[in-house]
Amino acid sequence: MTTQTPGPAAGLFIAFEGGDGAGKSTQAAELAGALEARGLTVLRTREPGGTPIGEKLRSLVLDHGHGHIDARTEALIFAASRAAHAEQVIRPALERGEVVLTDRYIDSSVAYQGAGRDLGTEVVRTLNEWATSGLQPDLTVLLDVDPADGRRRRTAGAAAEDRLESEADEFHARIRAAFLDLAAAQPEKYLVLAAQLPVPELAARIRDRVEALLALREGSPA
């Protein structure tokens, strides 16, 4: 369950994870629309970003042209952005009883910097758990995408890749494996779906899982 939020009145925290080009933002938007149609208050946000300082850090770490960024510095920038995001945006929304949908969270740092940059998944996890004071999603939706397919998706229409997206497919393969390992370790907290499935099918499966979580929350004793 989400930590450090009030009991039955607390909101629901859902993270969308997966490699670049998996379709996370599309599915977050689909879910937000479905939940808002139910009359729920939904906050959509993203990482890195979500706060003024987080958006500045996003530019520093993802845009080309800022010079070399070593792996530890990269990990710390992501953690700093996430600390502000959790404290200033996510936790207050949960305390108001809202549903928070974030495009990326701690698992992205564990996969990208821990596995992709070879800093060590446990080291990066510990750093980010400290940065967020232990705030964890109630559910993580993992959209699993093959690195080559992800590159085709994100470069469709001659779209430019950011600093991390432009890394070699071998880097993205390590990230994919790390995401799947995270999900396998705690299957009850993950919904793993193949990103190549049709958008409506993915949306329906995600909606069904979230509806089940909402039913449990609404049926919990006061």
Image: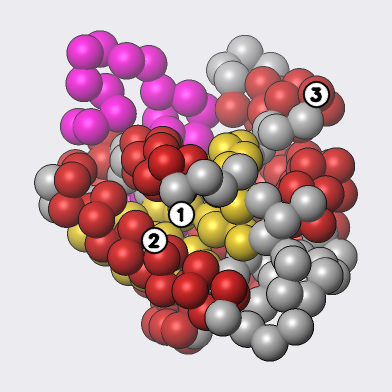
Instruction: Determine the residue positioned at 77% across, 30% down.
Output: 51
Q: Is residue 189 above or below residue 22?
A: below
The kind of residue tagged 1 is Glu
SS type, badge 3: helix
Instruction: Determine the residue positioned at 41% across, 65% down.
Output: 211
185 magenta-colored:
no
State which quarter of the image contains the C terminus.
bottom right
Q: Position of residue 220 (x, y in %)?
A: 63, 83
Q: Residues within 10 Å of mark 1 (few under 14, many from 20)?
A: many
Depth check, front residue: 111 or 73:
111
Instruction: Determine the residue positioned at 56% across, 81% down.
Output: 219
Write down the residue under mark 3.
52
Q: Position of residue 62 (x, y in %)?
A: 59, 27
* Mark with earlier residue (3, 2): 3
The colour scheme of the drawn protein is secondary structure
Depth check, front residue: 40 or 79:
40
Residue 81 visible in image: yes
Q: Position of residue 35 (x, y in %)?
A: 45, 48
Q: Which residues are magenta?
A: 152-176
How far apart marks 2 and 1 lie (CA) works out to 5 Å
Q: Is residue 214 left or right of residue 78?
A: left
SS type, badge 2: strand
The kind of residue tagged 2 is Leu
Write down the residue under mark 2.
142
Numbered disc total: 3
- For the residues labelled 2 and 1, say whether their Cβ atoms are less than 8 Å apart: yes
- For the residues labelled 3 and 2, say whether their Cβ atoms are less than 8 Å apart: no
Numbered badge on residue 87: none
How far apart marks 1 and 3 lie (CA) works out to 22 Å
* Mark with earlier residue (2, 1): 1
Q: Is residue 173 above or below residue 216?
A: above
Write down the residue under mark 1.
17
